[in-house]
Amino acid sequence: MEGNLVATLQLLNNTPLPVAGSDSHGPDVITYSDILKVIKLTLYDPMKLFPQLADLLTSVSNGGSGADFATFKMKTKSPICPDEPSEHPHHIHTTSENVIRIQRQFLIP
């Protein structure tokens, strides 16, 4: 088991695994660092997460397509631009009122 993990990590470190898009995920590339992130996550709750880790590793090892891993990445990825505005005090809400204020302040002489 350890040998299979090491071989998978070495292979992905040298050659990331491209995964074609499907109905459950878009096109993706599975990398060495993706595997390490999941292993690190599993260490926080091994009794609950180890079975999922084993399935994900099986998805990318021994010539697997990596589709299950790509689906996992897609489901756990946080959006770069969240749908909801931030409540952070320095966050600028892009309402039309703010746009007009910024235009008046900086663009209109």
Image: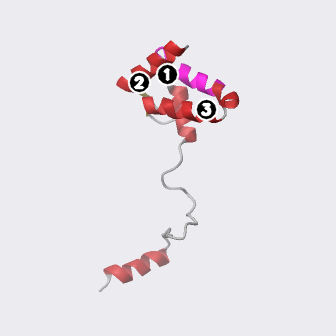
Query: Which quadrant of the figure contains the N terminus?
Result: top right
Q: Nearer the viewer, residue 96 or 92?
A: 92
Instruction: Give the residue type at disc 3.
Output: Leu
How far apart are the two marked residues, 2 and 1, measured between alpha carbons?
Answer: 9 Å
Residue labelled with disc 1: 60
Mark closest to the chain's N terminus, 2 or 1? 2
81 relative to 77, above or below: below
Residue on which disc 2 sits: 12
- Over which residues does the magenta segment extend? 51-63
Gap between marks 1 and 3 measured at Cα: 20 Å
**Picture colour scheme:** secondary structure
Q: Which callout, 3 or 2, points to the residue nearer the camera?
A: 3
Q: Which residue is mark 3?
A: 43
User: Does 19 lie within the magenta span?
Assistant: no
Query: Of marks 3 and 2, which one's residue comes earlier in the chain?
Result: 2
Numbered badge on residue 104: none
